[in-house]
Image (spheres, rainbow, N blue to C red):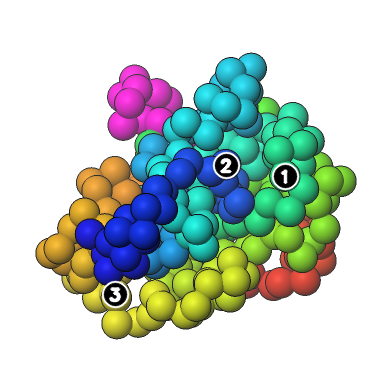
Amino acid sequence: MSPKYKFLKEQGLRPEKQLPSALIIGVKKGGTRALLEFIRVHPDVRAAGSEVHFFDRNYAKGFQWYREKMPATLEGQLTIEKTPSYFITKEAPRRVHLMNPSTKLLVVVRDPVTRAISDYTQAISKKPEMKPFEKLVFVNGSIGSIIDTSWGPIKLGIYSRYLTRWLKFFPLSQLLFVSGERLVVDPAIELKRVQDFLGLKRVVTEKHFYFNTTKGFPCLFKSEGHSAPHCLGKTKGRNHPYVSPSVLQRLRDFYRPFNNHFYQMTGINFGWT
Ligand code: A3P
């Protein structure tokens, strides 16, 4: 029990469940789990452990139901939830706005080409009979034909389209774009941005991370519920299948105009080439 919690409990102040004031809305395979696990190290942040899928699948259950899914918080603590499918759910911006127009929105973005391969890697791990990535990418299954923009892993990487919907309800200043690439290379820098955005003291710093060479990713020295150093689970940081340079090039060319549009909209050049 933290000293703050103990003190408040002694004062007779009981923790209560609150609707989230910040959401990690996406993107799928961007590094959303890493961001949630890293930010919840902060003593003033409490997070729902698993994805609640309220604004997409469970909206009809109502806000009372949603609140019940949240961890109890003390005054001054921030409640956060992450469900990456919110970013692409048509109704989500309006619904989140209805809950609270000041909700802070975090979006972890990653090069859409690698993101698509990561998405496919996850899908095939559940459905091994899937066709190879290089076939699914193209309408007729061959590199000579056009990119299949109806295929989920490809479609989801057109970030500017989805962002347009969110910007109809929220000002850009209420969204923070976290670089999925930098979250791997320098998590402390991204966490500094996140803490500033959420109005939190800069507590999570480089001291909390170490690079695990076996996993090839940054891991945490300790966090809530873990007193020992630990990394994210086996499903995070999977090996990707080989994709030929020519297919990668086709995908890069395909995404370039959409990426440029996204950079314009956000005012950030993520450097995906
Ligand atoms: P891969 O498994 O394809 O490498 P999400 O949590 O949104 O599903 O994102 C999963 C991705 O998070 C992983 O994709 C991995 O690249 C990335 N990631 C970022 N930081 C990580 C970390 N510290 N440990 C493991 N994976 C991390």
Asked if residue 120 lies left or right of residue 193, the reply is left
Residue occupied by mark 3: 209
Local SS, label 1: loop
Give the quarter of the figure containing the N terminus.
bottom left
| Amino acid at circle 2 | Leu
Three-letter code for the amino acid on which mark 1 is drawn: Asn
In the image: residue 150, left or right of residue 188: right
- Please state which amino acid type lies under the numbered disc 3: Phe
Name the spot of residue 3 as percent of width and height, x first.
Answer: 27, 68
Q: Residues within 10 Å of mark 3 (few under 14, many from 20)?
A: many
Q: Is residue 138 magenta?
A: no
Say which residue appears at 63% left-offset and 63% top-offset: 177
Quarter occupied by residue 152: top right
User: Which one is in front in this view, the residue at disc 1 or the one at disc 3?
Assistant: 1
Residue drawn at x 59%, y 71% is 199
Question: Label 3, label 2: how many angstroms apart (C-alpha)?
Answer: 29 Å
What is the C-alpha distance between the residues marked 2 and 1? Answer: 9 Å
Q: Which residues are magenta?
A: 123-135
Question: Does residue 84 appear in the picture of this structure?
Answer: no
- Residue 136: x, y in percent? 53, 30
In the displayed orientation, state which residue is furthest to the top: 60
Marking on residue 100: 1
Instruction: First in sequence, mark 2 or 1: give its number.
Output: 2
- Report if the CB atoms under discs 2 and 1 are less than 8 Å apart: yes
Please name which of the two marks, 3 or 2, marks the residue nearer to the observer: 2
Q: Residue at x 29, y 75 (%)?
A: 208
Task: Tell me residue 272's x, y (percent).
Answer: 61, 66
